[in-house]
C-alpha cells in the first residue's frame, strides 16, 4: 500500500513538470529581427517563442510563412521568391500574439539581380573533322539580358543558329542554349576563336563571360607527293561518306578501285608524276556539302569524277572552291551531286576539255560557263537537272524544280560556243531555238555563214560528205558539233533552217534527241516544234551523198 502511494506522488510530480515546460518564460516573438538573402531567394527558418496563440502576416507577396499561425512556441519556414528587378527590395513579417495583441517583426532584405551573362562551360574543344550532322556544340548561357553573339570577322569556321532570350520574368537569370556549328579544318595547326556575348541596349554587366573555342589541327598533307595523294583520297572519301569506295590504307594505292596512277607509257607523263594520281572516281556517297577540301591536293590529276550523292533532289549545293584549285584538270564530272551553283573561281579551270554536270538541280545555266572562261572545253553535259517532274508548267505552284527553269530563253551562247558535244536533254528549257537570220539579214550580229569555200573544202575532204551548194548563205552554227541533244524539254516555235539542214543532223538522231519535246510550257503551250518534219526524206534529198540509215541496214544485211 505504501508503494502505491509513492507511485502516485511521482506521477503527479512529472505531470506538474510537463505543464511548466509548455509555458515559455522568454518574451513573445521570433528569434531573429532581420534576414538578408540573395537575389535567388530560398528558405530560412525562424523560431517563434509564444505562450499563446499567434498569427503571422507580411506586406510582401514574395514572402510566404509556413505555418502562418499556431499556438505556443513554433518553428516556421520563410519561403522567399527570387528577385525580379535589379534594385534590392525589403519586406516585413509581423507576428501578433492573439491574447496580448503584442506585435513583433522580422525585416527581410533581398538583393536585386545584377545584369550578367555567364557560361556553364567557357572553354570548348572540337575536332578538325566530323560529318556535317555532328559538327556542332551547344553552349548554355545564363543571362538576364538579351544579347548578340559576336564572332570575330577573321573566324570563318564558326557560325551560330538562331536563339531566343525570353525576358518575361523580369531580370531573373534564365538559361539560353546557343548552338554553334563549325567547319572542317584543313590547316595543320590549332585554330582558336574568342566569342563575345554583347548585351542589347544600354546595360552595364556585372559579369560577362567569353567563350573560347579551340579546334584541333588537321593532318598535314604533303603537297605534290604520292603520299599526299593517298592521304587526300582517303580524306575526300571520308568526307563524302562513300559506301562504295572502301579503300584500305594499308594497301598500295595501285590496288584502289577507281584510282589510276601515272605510268611512264601514258600520254602527258613526266617523271615528277610517277606513281601519283592521274584520275580518281568517287561514287555512291552521302554528303550535304560541296566538294571536300582535300581534293585540292590531287595536283597531278587530269580527270576527277563525283557520281551519285544521296537525296540530291533535297540539296542545293555549291561546289566550293577546293576543286577550282586544280587548273590542270582536263575532265571533270560532278553528276548527281545536288548542285545548284558553281563557285565563282570555277573559271580557273582553264584546261577543262570535258565537263559533265548532269543530274543536278540547276535552276539556271551558271553564268561562268562561257567560251572565254573555258577556252579548251569541247564537251558540256547538263542534261537531267530536274529536281522534280512537272508536266504542266502553267498549272503548277511547285517551286524550286531545277531543270534550268529560270532561263528566259534558250541559251544562245552555247550554240555559238562550237562545242563537239552539247547535251541539254530533260530540263525545262522553253521558247524557240534562235534562227541566226540569213546572210542578207543576220540576227543579233551573227557573221558566220556557209560559203563556196566550205563547199569546195568538203569536196576535197574524203572524210566529209560533200556539202550541196544550196547550203551557201545558211548560218554556220555548231559546225564542229558531233553530238547535240535537247529532247524532253518544253520547247516550242519553229525549227530554224540552220538546224533542219545542218550537215551533222543525221548523226544527231533528231527524231529522238531534238524534235522530241514533252509537256506544257509556262504559257500553256503544248511543247513541240510547229514544223517538225514527218520523216527525214527532205534531208537526204538535200544531201544526196549521205547514206540513209535504211540503206546502211540493207548494206549490212547484204554483207552478211
Image (cartoon, rainbow, N blue to C red):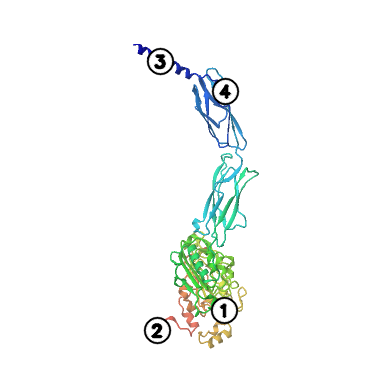
Q: Find disc 4 in the rendering and name its residue.
A: 104
Measure the C-alpha gap from mark 4 to mark 2. Answer: 121 Å
Where in the figure is residue 453, as x and y percent of width and height? 58, 85
Where in the figure is residue 338, as x and y percent of width and height? 50, 63
Measure the C-alpha gap from mark 2 to mark 1. Answer: 33 Å
Q: Residue at position x 55%, y 82% from top?
A: 471
Depth check: give the residue in front, 164 or 217. 217
Q: Residue at position x 44%, y 72% from top?
A: 255
Measure the C-alpha gap from mark 4 to mark 1. Answer: 109 Å
Comes first in the chain, label 4 or label 2 = 4
Comes first in the chain, label 1 or label 3 = 3
Comes first in the chain, label 2 or label 1 = 1
- Does the CB distance between marks 1 and 3 fall below 8 Å? no
Measure the C-alpha gap from mark 2 to mark 3. Answer: 137 Å
Q: Find disc 1 in the rendering and name its residue.
A: 476
Comes first in the chain, label 4 or label 1 = 4
Where in the figure is residue 518, as x and y percent of width and height? 47, 67
Where in the figure is residue 370, as x and y percent of width and height? 58, 71
Quadrant holding the N terminus: top left
SS label for mark 3: helix
- Does the CB distance between marks 2 and 3 fall below 8 Å? no
For label 2, the crowd category at 10 Å Cα-Cα, with few meaning under 14, some 14 to 19 and many 20 or more, is few
Tag in front: 3 or 4: 3
Tag in front: 4 or 2: 4
Residue sticking out furthest to the left: 1
Describe residue 10's horizontal placement relative to residue 415 as left or right.
left
Amino acid at each position: 500500500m505504501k508503494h502505491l502511494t509513492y507511485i502516485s506522488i511521482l506521477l503527479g510530480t512529472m505531470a506538474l513538470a510537463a505543464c511548466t515546460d509548455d509555458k515559455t518564460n522568454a518574451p513573445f516573438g521570433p528569434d531573429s529581427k532581420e534576414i538578408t538573402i540573395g537575389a535567388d531567394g530560398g528558405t530560412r527558418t525562424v523560431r517563434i517563442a509564444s505562450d499563446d496563440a499567434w498569427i503571422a502576416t507580411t506586406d510582401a507577396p514574395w514572402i510566404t510563412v509556413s505555418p502562418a499561425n499556431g499556438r505556443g512556441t513554433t518553428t516556421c519556414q520563410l519561403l522567399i521568391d527570387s528577385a525580379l528587378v535589379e534594385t534590392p527590395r525589403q519586406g516585413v513579417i509581423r507576428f501578433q500574439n492573439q491574447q496580448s495583441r503584442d506585435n513583433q517583426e522580422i525585416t527581410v532584405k533581398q538583393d536585386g539581380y545584377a545584369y550578367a551573362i555567364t557560361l556553364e562551360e567557357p572553354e570548348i574543344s572540337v575536332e578538325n573533322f566530323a560529318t556535317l550532322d555532328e559538327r556542332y556544340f551547344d553552349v548554355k548561357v545564363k543571362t538576364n539580358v538579351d544579347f548578340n553573339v559576336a564572332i570575330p570577322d577573321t573566324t570563318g569556321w564558326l557560325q551560330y543558329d538562331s536563339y531566343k532570350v525570353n525576358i518575361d520574368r523580369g531580370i531573373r537569370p534564365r538559361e539560353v542554349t546557343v548552338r554553334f556549328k563549325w567547319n572542317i579544318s584543313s590547316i595543320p595547326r590549332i585554330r582558336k576563336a574568342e566569342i563575345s556575348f554583347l548585351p542589347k541596349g544600354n546595360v552595364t554587366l556585372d559579369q560577362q563571360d567569353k567563350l573560347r573555342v579551340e579546334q584541333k589541327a588537321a593532318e598535314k598533307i604533303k603537297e605534290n607527293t604520292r603520299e599526299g595523294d593517298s592521304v587526300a583520297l582517303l580524306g575526300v572519301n571520308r568526307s563524302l561518306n562513300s559506301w562504295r569506295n572502301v579503300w584500305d590504307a594499308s594497301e598500295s594505292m595501285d590496288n584502289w578501285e577507281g584510282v589510276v596512277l601515272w605510268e611512264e607509257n601514258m600520254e602527258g607523263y613526266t617523271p615528277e608524276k610517277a606513281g601519283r594520281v592521274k584520275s580518281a572516281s568517287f561514287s555512291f556517297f552521302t554528303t550535304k556539302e560541296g566538294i571536300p577540301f582535300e581534293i585540292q591536293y590531287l595536283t597531278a590529276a587530269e580527270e576527277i569524277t563525283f557520281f551519285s550523292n544521296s537525296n540530291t533532289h533535297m540539296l542545293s549545293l555549291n561546289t566550293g572552291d577546293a576543286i577550282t584549285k586544280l587548273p590542270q584538270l582536263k575532265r571533270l564530272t560532278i553528276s548527281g551531286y545536288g548542285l545548284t551553283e558553281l563557285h565563282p573561281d570555277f573559271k580557273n579551270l582553264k584546261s577543262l576539255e570535258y565537263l559533265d554536270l548532269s543530274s543536278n538541280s540547276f535552276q539556271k545555266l551558271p553564268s561562268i560557263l562561257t567560251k572565254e572562261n573555258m577556252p579548251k572545253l569541247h564537251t558540256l553535259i547538263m542534261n537531267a537537272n530536274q529536281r522534280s517532274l512537272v508536266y504542266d508548267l502553267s498549272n503548277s505552284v511547285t517551286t524550286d524544280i531545277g531543270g534550268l527553269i529560270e532561263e528566259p530563253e534558250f541559251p544562245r551562247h552555247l550554240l555559238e560556243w562550237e562545242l563537239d558535244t552539247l547535251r541539254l536533254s530533260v530540263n525545262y528549257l522553253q521558247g524557240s531555238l534562235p534562227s541566226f537570220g540569213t546572210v542578207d539579214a543576220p540576227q543579233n550580229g551573227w557573221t558566220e555563214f556557209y560559203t563556196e569555200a566550205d563547199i569546195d573544202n568538203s569536196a576535197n575532204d574524203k572524210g566529209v560528205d560533200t556539202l550541196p551548194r544550196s547550203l551557201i548563205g545558211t548560218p554556220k552554227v555548231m559546225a564542229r558539233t558531233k553530238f547535240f541533244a535537247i529532247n524532253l524539254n518544253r520547247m516550242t516555235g519553229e525549227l530554224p533552217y540552220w538546224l533542219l539542214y545542218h550537215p551533222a543532223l543525221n548523226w544527231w538522231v533528231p527524231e529522238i534527241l531534238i524534235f522530241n519535246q514533252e509537256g506544257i510550257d509556262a504559257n500553256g503551250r503544248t511543247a513541240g516544234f510547229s514544223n517538225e518534219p514527218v520523216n527525214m526524206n527532205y534531208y537526204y534529198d538535200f544531201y544526196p551523198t549521205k547514206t540513209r540509215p535504211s540503206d546502211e541496214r540493207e548494206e549490212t544485211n547484204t554483207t552478211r
